[in-house]
């Protein structure tokens, strides 16, 4: 078997440089701070190092410019949402705007837009926080377990989905049903506000703490706000509003259904009074 030829000095130095050895030592000490000329070994090491560096630069991929953020800054997205919502002259146009709106990151992770369900001419409007898994699949609000309970709640006061209008503050499902961020809520807020204006109900019912605090501008918890008549000002008229428990909360804490029933009875009496 023929032995392989010994590597040349340049090849050996190149190997050392690639292995991380970046200087060569000789038998005689070298004062690297003096102006003396470098040894031949150091010259060779320098030449080999420069060659390696040049070869690495040639083979390195070209720098890639950082990708621009596809979403506008939060303040810009909020301003865009306000302007778009303000110009929507009907619920159909508002829905089309939301379908095209790219200012909220939730849209990219959701399956579909969950706009509303029920009768747009209804005298009463229910607003929750955000869609869940079932709503994301079907594209309708309150169709899962909490939706079935909501159906029973409104049926208890002689109503059904043909006589009410149902929506959410957030029209896209947050990933994993997480709580929407304050920024996401503020970006979506102009759309639900315009939706309420266009439906123009006689009574607005907020379901749960998040939608109550967002729409009724209160920092109090649902235990203090529920069952009380409050005002929701659209800018053109004042709508009577009441907060009550979210159906999902009632599924977890059924003992509070009694209080929710009291809220529904008060709402039913108010509707009867409006009719008469």
Image (cartoon, grey):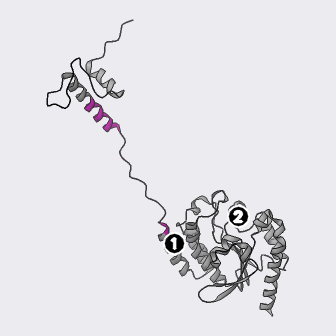
Residue placed most toward the observer, 38 or 159: 38
Residue at the far top in the pictured view: 1
The location of residue 224, given as percent across then percent down, is 72, 76
Point out the image quarter for the N terminus: top left
Q: Is residue 90 visible?
A: yes
Disc 2 target residue: 135
Disc with the residue nearer the chain's start (2 vs 1): 1
The location of residue 92, given as percent across then percent down, is 62, 77
| Residue 170 horizontal side relative to residue 144, left or right | left
| Residue 238 horizontal side relative to residue 13, left or right | right
159 in the magenta segment = no
59 in the magenta segment = yes
The segment highlighted magenta reads 49-74
What SS does tag 1 mark? helix
The location of residue 4, given as percent across then percent down, is 35, 11
Category of crowding for the residue at label 1, using alpha-carbon neighbours closer than 10 angstroms: few (below 14), some (14–19), many (at least 20): many
Q: Residue at x 60, y 79 (%)?
A: 194
Marking on residue 105: none
Q: Of tags 2 and 1, which is closer to the observer?
A: 1
Disc 1 target residue: 78
The location of residue 234, given as percent across then percent down, is 61, 85
In terms of image quadrants, where is residue 57? top left
Residue placed most toward the observer, 34 or 190: 34
Q: Is residue 122 visible?
A: no
Residue 159 sits above or below residue 34 on the image:
below
What SS does tag 2 mark? helix
Q: What is the CA distance from the residue labelled 2 to the residue labelled 1?
A: 25 Å
In terms of image quadrants, where is residue 233? bottom right
Q: Residue at x 56, y 71 (%)?
A: 186
């Amino acid at each position: 078997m023929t032995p392989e030829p010994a590597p040349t000095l340049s090849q050996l130095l190149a190997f050392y440089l690639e292995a991380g050895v970046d200087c060569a030592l000789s038998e005689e000490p070298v004062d690297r701070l003096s102006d003396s000329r470098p040894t031949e070994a150091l010259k060779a090491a320098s030449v080999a190092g420069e060659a390696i560096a040049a070869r690495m630069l040639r083979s390195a991929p070209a720098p890639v410019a950082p990708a621009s953020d596809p979403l506008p800054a939060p303040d810009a997205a909020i301003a865009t949402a306000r302007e778009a919502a303000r110009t929507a002259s009907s619920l159909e146009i508002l829905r089309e705007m939301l379908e095209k709106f790219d200012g909220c990151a939730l849209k990219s992770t959701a399956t579909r837009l969950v706009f509303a369900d029920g009768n747009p001419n209804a005298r009463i409007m229910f607003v929750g926080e955000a869609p869940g898994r079932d709503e994301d699949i079907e594209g309708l609000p309150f169709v899962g377990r909490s939706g079935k309970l909501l159906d029973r709640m409104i049926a208890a006061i002689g109503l059904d989905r043909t006589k009410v209008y149902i929506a959410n503050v957030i029209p896209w499902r947050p990933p994993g049903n997480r709580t929407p961020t304050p920024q996401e809520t503020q970006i979506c807020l102009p759309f639900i506000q315009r939706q309420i204006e266009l439906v123009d109900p006689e009574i607005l019912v907020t379901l749960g703490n998040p939608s109550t605090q967002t729409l009724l501008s209160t920092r109090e918890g649902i235990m203090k706000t529920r069952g009380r008549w409050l005002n929701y000002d659209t800018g053109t008229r004042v709508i009577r509003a009441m907060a009550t428990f979210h159906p999902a909360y009632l599924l977890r804490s059924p003992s509070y259904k009694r209080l929710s029933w009291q809220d529904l009875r008060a709402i039913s009496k108010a509707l009867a009074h409006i009719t008469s």
